[in-house]
Image: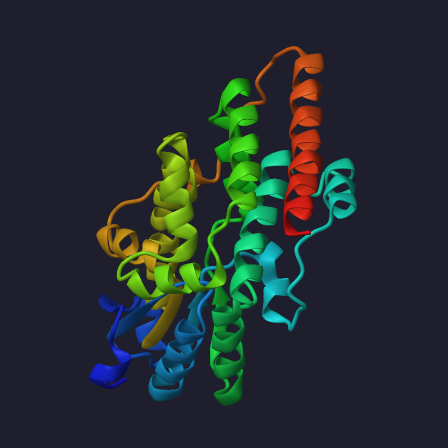
Amino acid sequence: MGELPEELAKGVVCLECETSPEAAAAGVGGTCRVYVVGTAHVSQESCDQVKAVINYLKPQAVFLELCASRIAILTPQNLEVPTMNEMIDMWKKKKMNTFGILYSWFLAKVASQLEVLPGAEFRVAFEEARSYGGKVILGDRPVQITLRRTWGKMSLWHRTKFLYYIIFQSIFLPSPEELNKMLKDMDDVDMLTLVIQEMSKAFPSLMETLLHERDMYMSSKLLKVAREHSSVVAVVGKGHVSGIKKNWQQPIQVRALLELPVAKQGPSKLKMLASIGALSGVIIASGVYIWGRK
């Protein structure tokens, strides 16, 4: 796999490792070169770069910052923000915890402002790999584990405070023009990481579970993939690139990163009130937002 031309190399980090003895015996080269492409997550420019890099290198494997439960992102979708009824239905059916529902809602709001489908760069990478028979590997930690570990590290007060924080921030999102300018100004961070960094000022544990733990998990998973192939392109958010590089070929306790927190014992009525309060907040906030647009 050759070197990237300068116009394609922006935001791309190259890593290397020795292939496994089994892979070498099967005819895979002794060294694997991994190109980690950092994207902005909600940027057409990032989609174009991902397509160009994969088309140029045609790697054996394409590694994506996705898990199996998010595989639907790889199929064409309409850009829709979940309705209140849909969110309540997800909550009743326990498809996600309250944090996951409102966090996803907030990210969809940001993406709708930019009119770029969430995960568009992953769809582009998937389609480009399929065009020449490349292998596609989903390498992120299961999202439900990430959300449960994040939620489990918060006190009841922080959970309630966090939910209202997300609602408030979603009402006062910057304009599409301002968001696009922010994307152009971001050299080493993606939109999702920027959101996490901002929220972590009030909720420090978010950086640990939503960013640093996933950096370690993906770095370990990517290394495992690289040892079985001669060439790999990894497509991840810009905010993960430095963490993946930092943890490259380091001893990582993956099992510990997959452990679920022990459910905290507490007054169930209080938890119910907190959840009801959060959902009520969404209803109030949505009403204010709609009224303000009239």
- Number of dots carrying numbers: 0
Residue located farthest toward the top when viewing the structure as drawn: 267
Q: Residue at x 47, y 75 (%)?
A: 125
Q: Residue at x 38, y 50 (%)?
A: 193
Q: Quadrant of residue 275?
A: top right
Q: Quadrant of residue 189?
A: bottom left
Please tell me which residue lies in front, 238 or 112. 112
Residue 178 in the image: x percent, y percent?
A: 41, 59
Residue 134 in the image: x percent, y percent?
A: 47, 81
Please tell me which residue lies in front, 249 or 274. 274
Residue 157 in the image: x percent, y percent?
A: 52, 19
Residue 3 at least partly seen: no
Residue 62 in the image: x percent, y percent?
A: 43, 73
Q: Residue at x 65, y 22 (%)?
A: 274
Q: Residue at x 29, y 71 (%)?
A: 35
Q: Quadrant of residue 256?
A: top left
Q: On the rendered structure, is 57 left or right of 3?
A: right
Vertical side of 48 occupied by 160: above or below: above
Residue located farthest toward the front when viewing the structure as drawn: 294
Residue 127 at least partly seen: yes
Colour mode of the rendering: rainbow
Vertical side of 86 occupied by 181: above or below: below
Please tell me which residue lies in front, 220 or 281. 281
Looking at the rendering, in which quadrant would you find the N terminus? bottom left
